[in-house]
Image (cartoon, rainbow, N blue to C red):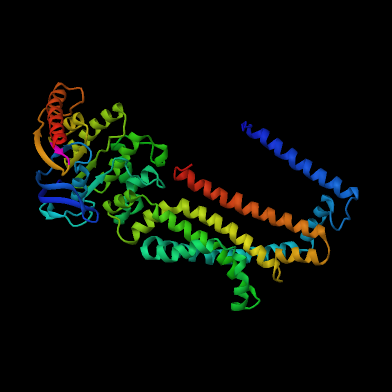
Amino acid sequence: MRSVSIAPHRRWVLRLAFFGALLVAWEILGRAGIWPEYLFPPFSKVLAAIGHGFTDKSYPIGIGASLWRLVEGYLIALVAGLFIGMAMAEVRWLKDTVGLLVMGLQALPSICWLPLAILWFGLNERAILFVVVMGAVMSIAQSTEDGIRNTSPVYIKAARNLGAKGIRIYSAVIFPAALPSIVTGMKMGWAFAWRSLMAGELLYTLPGLGHLLNMGRELNDMSQVLAVIIVIVTIGLITDKIVFGAVEKRVRARWGLR
Amino acid sequence: MALNIELRGVSRRYDVRDKNVLDALDVTDLSIAAGEFICIVGPSGCGKSTLLNLIAGLDTPTTGEVLVGGKPVRGADPSRVLIFQDAALFPWLTAQSNVEFGLRMQGMPAKKRAEESSRLLDLVHLKGFERAYVHELSGGMRQRVAIARALAVNPAVLLMDEPFGALDAMTRDILHAELQDVWMRTRMTIVFVTHNVRESVVLGDRVLVMTRRPGRVVTDHAVEYKRPRRIEDENTARISRLISTELRERGAMDAQR
């Protein structure tokens, strides 16, 4: 197989053409009347549903509620993940015990925690929060541990030699050295938390994007369902690629990594 | 201020696995005067780096004692700074922040630190590169920053572990001149490890030759011609020839053992 590189501006033309064609095809298929509109609405109907959702404030409220839950759970996961990661990196036997557990639990889609969370906390916000935290904490812990463990010993040697002691070795050398890896883990953790949150909100009625999605189903309103999906994709792309992607890129560039 | 270095019966062995031990450094006695520029040459694996780490206090001897300025070495201290072959600069800091690292650890205020780092970067001919990150600097520039970073904490002893080993010959020549210049101005004690015989002759007041397995110092050559010395000087070639011949004969002897 051979791949030919394309100039950046031509790539953008290609992308615009592709998505433009996709939307036009969608619109034509939707209007053709092959399927009933409540199963396959044209793009214009979905766009109208998005507009409507924003004017009647149901989307801003839903987005706000979901993002708030996400941020709350993510911050808890961040603090816990950093702490667990540092403990695993520093204490050999923790790596051999808790480290294995963390690795094992990473294989578990975090929505599987929901039944447990409901039994523990009841059908409330805390159950969802628990699922979000569990979604993010493992990858943050893992990448923190990786980053710290892979810190070149020569940096620590040099720092000690120049008079760094105790906690300063951590704050001035080990932590910055591990930062590129930690940021990658934070980005992954955010993506996992976002997915867990959407799954949790779908299974459980409270204000939020998952709830709006479910309401679309209950009202047989496919335009609403697709509209919310587009909103969810957009938010995911913005946070993942633009916010975290940019931070990751900056950190890696400054650290001189590719 | 420079300090003298005294090694008394120092040796270092590492437990490799189970009962296997690696004799990195055989029992060594060594005296280095305050303000002396000492070069140590020898093949790789002869314990040169071990010796530096022991003086720096980054490693502890299995037997014997290292004294610097008459006091036994206990752990790392900014009065004895080691410069590594790969410079070991912190890639997340600018050249200036790297130079200021030791001063920051001492709690020196930012303004005073900036004055110091600017003076030192000037000394190593890196004015204008204050804000550059490590990956933006060439190998020679990185070693200059490493030297400035070491000088910042005002060490009495500077330990250099093949610092120019990875540089091209032209850059190395320039840095030889600069290092001699720095040393003549500061007159600190320098212990410089290399496997490049000519380099050791250009830089050292004395050249110690080490052999391997277990590593030990076998001969001690005084180098006395006028500084600043250059790699192409007659004397450099003559003394290097002497030492190289010796190293080769020692190597042949080792091979027969």
Q: Nearer the viewer, residue B100 or A115?
A: A115
Residue shown at 44% from the left, 55% from the top? A146
In reply to whether residue B255 is colored magenta, the answer given is: no
Q: Position of residue B107 (x, y in %)?
A: 31, 56
The magenta stretch is B208-212
In reply to whether residue B209 is colored magenta, the answer given is: yes
Q: Position of residue A201 (x, y in %)?
A: 68, 67
Residue shown at 69% from the left, 54% from the top? A233
Residue shown at 89% from the left, 55% from the top? A36
Q: What is the magenta segment's predominant secondary structure? A: strand
Q: Residue furthest right?
A: A33
Q: Quadrant of the C terminus of chain B?
A: top left
User: Can residue A137 be seen?
Assistant: no
Q: Nearer the viewer, residue A109 or A66?
A: A109
Q: Position of residue B235 (x, y in %)?
A: 13, 24
Q: Position of residue B204 (x, y in %)?
A: 15, 34
Up-down relation of residue A118 to residue B179 (above or below): below
